[in-house]
Image (spheres, coloured by chain):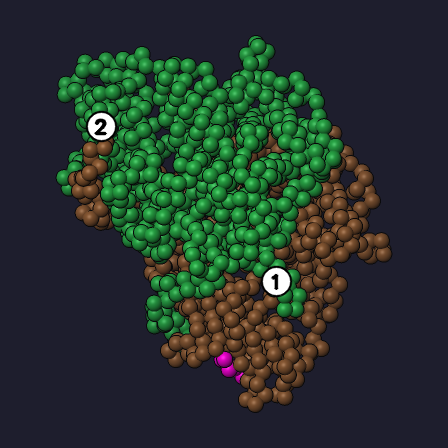
Chain colours: A green, B brown
Amino acid sequence: MEEAGRIDHLSGERQKAQFDLQPMKVLLAGGEHELDVAQRVAAIVARDPVFSKANRTRLSREELYKNSLRKASHGWKLIQQLKLTEEEAFKLRSLVDEPTFTDLHWGMFVPAIKGQATDEQQKYWLPLAYKMAVIGCYAQTELGHGSNVQGLETTATFDPATDEFVMNSPNLTSTKWWPGGLGKASTHALVYARLITDNHDYGIHAFIVQIRSLDDHKPLPGVTVADIGVKFGNAGYNTMDNGLLRFDQVRIPRNNMLMKLAKVTKEGKYISSDVPKQLAYGAMVYVRQSIVSDASVYLSRAVTIAVRYSCVRRQFGGQGNDPETQVIDYKTQQHRLFPLLATTYAYRIVGQWLKWLYSDVMNRLESHDFSTLPEVHACTSGLKSLTTSVAADGIEECRKLCGGHGYLCSSGLPELYAAYVPACTYEGDNVVLLLQVARFLLKTLSQLGGGVKPVGTASYLGNLPVLTKQGSRVSQGTDWLDHSNLLYAFEARAARLALVATQLVQKAGNEAGFEQHSIELIEAARAHCELMVLSKFVERLQRGVPGRGVQRQLDILCEVYGLFLLVSRAGDFLSTGCLTPTQVALAKQQLQNLYTEVRPNAVALVDAFGHTDHYLGSILGRYDGDVYPNLYKDAWEEPLNKTVVTDGYEEYIRPILQQEFLTSRKARL
Amino acid sequence: MEEAGRIDHLSGERQKAQFDLQPMKVLLAGGEHELDVAQRVAAIVARDPVFSKANRTRLSREELYKNSLRKASHGWKLIQQLKLTEEEAFKLRSLVDEPTFTDLHWGMFVPAIKGQATDEQQKYWLPLAYKMAVIGCYAQTELGHGSNVQGLETTATFDPATDEFVMNSPNLTSTKWWPGGLGKASTHALVYARLITDNHDYGIHAFIVQIRSLDDHKPLPGVTVADIGVKFGNAGYNTMDNGLLRFDQVRIPRNNMLMKLAKVTKEGKYISSDVPKQLAYGAMVYVRQSIVSDASVYLSRAVTIAVRYSCVRRQFGGQGNDPETQVIDYKTQQHRLFPLLATTYAYRIVGQWLKWLYSDVMNRLESHDFSTLPEVHACTSGLKSLTTSVAADGIEECRKLCGGHGYLCSSGLPELYAAYVPACTYEGDNVVLLLQVARFLLKTLSQLGGGVKPVGTASYLGNLPVLTKQGSRVSQGTDWLDHSNLLYAFEARAARLALVATQLVQKAGNEAGFEQHSIELIEAARAHCELMVLSKFVERLQRGVPGRGVQRQLDILCEVYGLFLLVSRAGDFLSTGCLTPTQVALAKQQLQNLYTEVRPNAVALVDAFGHTDHYLGSILGRYDGDVYPNLYKDAWEEPLNKTVVTDGYEEYIRPILQQEFLTSRKARL
């Protein structure tokens, strides 16, 4: 973020912008209030030395973890002392920018209690959780079981003699494995286990299990708990104590089972409650909409770094004493970078829509209206899958766009990738999620005959007869700037791919057909998701956006998003006959013209994300563009540079140079 | 590698194989002799405790670096004591599997002297280098200059008064930056600098500069040298001391300029030698062919891990007491994994052909036949670019295919990616290289009119009139198993894309047109490179391969390689009119049929790469498939698990739990 009176190598770039920054910032933040909170909290975090990220890739795991505890503790103290609101506290935790145990406490443990505990249970647990008198984690995944929750093996067997559940890990693969905050920090775990009572296995239910003493933090008897070891990246997720957990006949009170949806009586009788199971669904929508929103944030950080550095970096093309060409001016660079910039904006807007969808779902759930749930499930599953995959790949692409220097940790990009990429796996593996979207599309199409009208993001499928027959009306390049033409092409592609996949599965006529044609199903699901993003972007623009030049920039970015995807997936559009080769060629040309329009606005468009230098944690992405002197300065902080002659010289290098190993070999050379 | 008398969870998989392992191993190794060397040396490395990789992601940078010096020194000692041949010594260094300073000494410093020094200079320097009485690195890249070698700013100014060159770093961006082995280990650097004599700048030349004392290893006066800091990944390339280097008027004898191609006389006169500059080209061909060969090796390691773990891992689909389905049986997994397996084989074969091409070029250079150089340049540039990009992405894809556990360093995959991905940037940025291929294609096409017949891998362009008009004759799925049909489609696509790009550039009529249409040029170049790989695979199979079932497996892999690419790039084939949508649909179907044929052979096909467990360094990829017990065991080696109650509990966790920060906030909850 701006600092007064300092050098700004990018000021020339900023002056080129053709729109007002402030209204764009407001739009991206989701409102004046949201922007104000973000800026105030960002300033608090950025100036606090405890939150410094300068050294994080140079610490050993133990130092790194301890330092992360320090940050979490300091953050909690600030939240108290500054009397931050929930919203501000949430913002603070995310801007500290280190995965840590409190993420799971606030993001999974507390919501799970809200969603699955009875009112009475909530009255007991929530106050404890809110003041962090207990620290909770979310222990679902096991060593042998990830995506298939129904396959979990941990057991909770009811013992009516003592009115307790006995938690047990019957074999190695049932070891809880991966839960964040479990390894070293948590006192309590929300454990998913097979409920066994009356000699019957009632399947997976949730239990709160205390795992560490509240006096001295030692594991309780029968509990084996530890960290699972080093993960991808220097810092990355290594600030998190992802843990393993085994139970050897650990007893918990019966009432530690979360009983909103089902309960076990004192006598060991299992009783489903009359609360509709669908009510538990709100939590999943909430988590997934926040993941989509994060996808945009993480990608925007990488794009900010790559855009700024591409303006600073020059290579080739200088004649005589002229400086070389800024790499951002190369078409090949633009073709990799600007679509990612556009994608960031597109995801921000679809994320804001998902936030609305969440509140809509919650309202409906309250009045027991479950009609939109299947479509909402497809939306959240599909968008989680699409946006996290694209954001992860996009971050790594931005790193590559920074050339050699992007490989240095001081670029901030390696850490960003390593910390982000698990989002493709947690909260639903991205391939599994796309298959769920495909199942929804199959069902929607198969119900069309019966007159069931598809709703929401699937409503275009009601137009199937037209979409599968009528081609695109694009006849010249500028037709592609008409958003309805773009939308039509995406709808036609999604509809046709869905239809082909449905027909294949129906022909097979059974569940095996679903697996057999899963490749085609995935393609159809992805097309549906890409359409969702585009259509929400177009819808948002139709509502109009205030601010000088802002709408124009967003129009361009929307077109870049759509046309780049169209060109990248030309195989889909052509093989389904949605477009002709000529129409694809026109799209390619138009896309390249748009890059020229993005170019002068590129730096301002990333400034609009409003990331502080602290949050970016990148020398290449500095607001002031003062890259080279700071790279040089930072190199000297490397621990290896503490000594002039390296440790190991005496034992390992000197003997080589002084021929101490060279005996009989000499003659052979 | 096999160990007698041990558990083997994958033996069932191995029994399914439909071919003999031994002849496949011979083919992949490049011959009986090569296989023998590889196996003998691999056994030496695997059993030596100094080369253990068990702890590498748990060490601090300083420990990691020192341990890497230890390995390098120990390796050198073994090479002496066991009297290893050059070939064996090379193999040993690569199987130790840690980037270290000796890589640059042997891989860049020595070859550069051979290529650019006069005979007399070689007689002085090579014996010193061979016995490592000097340790050399290769200092080309600067902080501000990577791809554009002509833009380097370091100067070497001749001073006739003392018969010396004065090496100088005139500004910050001229700081040498990135050279491996420079930061801490090397005594000498091969420095590229602008040669200035007689007040004239003669451009970039090579100089040998001693940078550290041979007595105490301290930097010499005027030399500033250090490590540039932490890079991507926990271990990765952090075992390498990539360095920075600045000269403040450092004097070296005139004769330290490498003078094979040009020299400076005592009087300061610059004289080009009559040795053709093309002779220096052999070194670049050598380096690039070895990079292509490495691409296959690195990708094969990731594929080995992913294939074996995909057989061990089960998820969903088990009924009752049946085990769940092996994830390798899912079509979606096969569609991501088997094409990478096929790609590994394809790259191995094109790598072997490149090795032949290198010896062919060297023979021609000796007799001053430079006729094939432009085509050879396009081959090596293009294949370096294609194979490193695909291998890097493929390694990361394999990591994702291993789900959550692939994110643990104990899977070996994070390190493999982090250590491999710089190959996309070093020795020529991959985008820049593709543009060089495009330039070759442009030139070839523009010379067709003049009757110049294209040769070697470009000879298909001589068939342009047919390729741009005649469609594919594929009319049923099995036609795609006829390799000539596959080849024709790839030739037609490459030819048509090259023609389109050429016409666009010619229309613009100038150098700006080249930049303006660089996106289309890149596409054409990539198509050309993909064709090269396919055609060399097909050619190799036409020569016949011995061993029961081996040819059949290779046929299948060749088809998977071709059809997967065809389906992934369907947009190219359709938009250029090479194929019809029906032909693409047939290809998709055929590809999926082939996966079924690969499936029973998958484990044997990765066994054939012959990687030891030491070299793989992966619990998920263990030969015996004994994954879960070893993951569990390894977790306990994590340093955080040395204490039961974590360091930091007293300062940071206890105060939270005991409400020490909770004062005024209490009332608000």
**Left or right: A510, with B404 as reference point:** right
Q: Name the chain under label 1.
A: A
**Local crowd size for mark 1, using a 10 Å CA cut-off: few (<14), some (14–19), many (≥20):** some
Residue located 59% across and 11% down the image: A449
B118 versus A442 height, above or below: below
Mark identifier at residue B43 = none
Residue located 46% across and 18% down the image: A372
Q: Nearer the viewer, residue A271 or A396?
A: A396
Membership of A394 in magenta stretch = no
Q: Amino acid at mark 1?
A: Glu
**Left or right: B95, with A582 as reference point:** left
Mark 1 or 2, closer to the camera: 1
Residue located 39% across and 40% down the image: A36
Residue B483 in picture, x, y percent from top left: 70, 40
Mark identifier at residue A125 = 2
The answer, for residue A528, to whether it is visible in the render is yes
Q: Amino acid at mark 2?
A: Trp
List the single residue furthest toward the top.
A450
Q: Quadrant of residue A88?
A: top left
Q: Nearer the viewer, residue A556 or B135?
A: A556
B298 versus A492 height, above or below: below
Q: Name the chain under label 2.
A: A
User: Of helix, strand and loop, which one carries label 1?
Assistant: loop
Q: Are marks 1 and 2 in contact (CB under 8 Å)?
A: no
Type of secondary structure dominating the magenta stretch: strand
List the single residue furthest toward the bottom.
B161
Residue B375 in picture, x, y percent from top left: 71, 58
**Mark-to-mark CA distance, 1 and 2:** 63 Å
Query: What range of the chain is rendered magenta?
Result: B249-253
The residue under label 1 is A324
The disc, 1 or 2, on the residue closer to the chain's N-terminal end is: 2
